[in-house]
Image (spheres, helix red, strand yellow):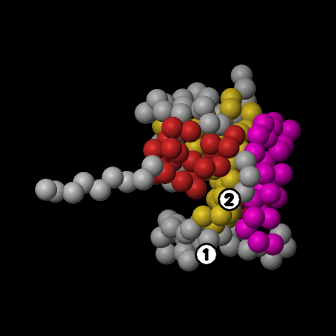
Amino acid sequence: MSHLYLVGLGSNQPHPLIGKPAQIIHQAIAALEMDDIDVFAQSAVITSAAMGPSRRCYANAATILSTELLPSELLTRLQEIESHFGRIRRGQPWGARTLDLDIILWSGGFWADRNPDLNIPHPEMRNRNFVLTPAAMIAPDWRDPITGLSIRQLQTRFNRPKRLDHAP
């Protein structure tokens, strides 16, 4: 049985052989295409501000993958690709990295694993415009199984001007 996955990609550190983060994203999308994984769709690459201690801007994108792999198997494959691109896991969240690949959603709805690195839907996706914007380019109608809202609706809510309540 084939599954669809929405995968977020990010890079904010150049690679000596590949080049700048946007080039890394394009190469990573090509690397995702394998005998048992098909890249069904890909977004444009966007630039976003860094989170946490890293000061370098990120290049971000999203892909839809089709594969028979279960989420835990796909995560292992994604981490192998990250390592191939020079990612070293230091346990520091939001640090500079050559490549970050995250499973955001999958066609099976929820996935909770004993692995703390794998919860689907991604727990922070609703709070990250750098995930929602590229995801909306390729999967605007895909629904978050927790809120029931589409990616397009989540992105609209995220980008809606914040109301300032003034006390009388």
Q: Residue furthest top?
A: 1
Residue bounds of the magenta highlight = 19-42
The disc labelled 2 sits on which kind of residue? Ile
Residue type marked 1: Arg
Residue 157 in the image, given as x and y percentages of width and height: 45, 44
Give 23 or 1, whichever is nearer the viewer: 23
Whether residue 38 is situated above or below residue 98 in the rendered picture:
above
Q: Residues within 10 Å of mark 1 (few under 14, many from 20)?
A: some
Say whether residue 32 is magenta.
yes
Q: Quadrant of residue 33?
A: top right
Residue 22 falls in which quadrant of the image? Answer: bottom right
Residue 66's image quarter? top right
Helix, strand or loop status at disc 2 = strand
Q: Is residue 156 visible?
A: yes
Mark 2 lies on residue: 46
Residue at 68% of width from left, 59% of height from top? 46
Check the image and report above or below for 49 versus 140. Answer: below
Determine whether the residue tagged by mark 1 lies in a helix, strand or loop. Answer: loop
Residue in the foreground of this view, choosing between 72 and 104: 104
Q: Nearer the viewer, mark 1 or mark 2?
A: 2
Quickly name the residue at label 1.
56
Question: Residue at point 56% right, 39% down?
Answer: 152
Q: Residues within 10 Å of mark 2 (few under 14, many from 20)?
A: some
Quadrant including the N terminus: top right
Residue 4 included in the magenta stretch of the image: no
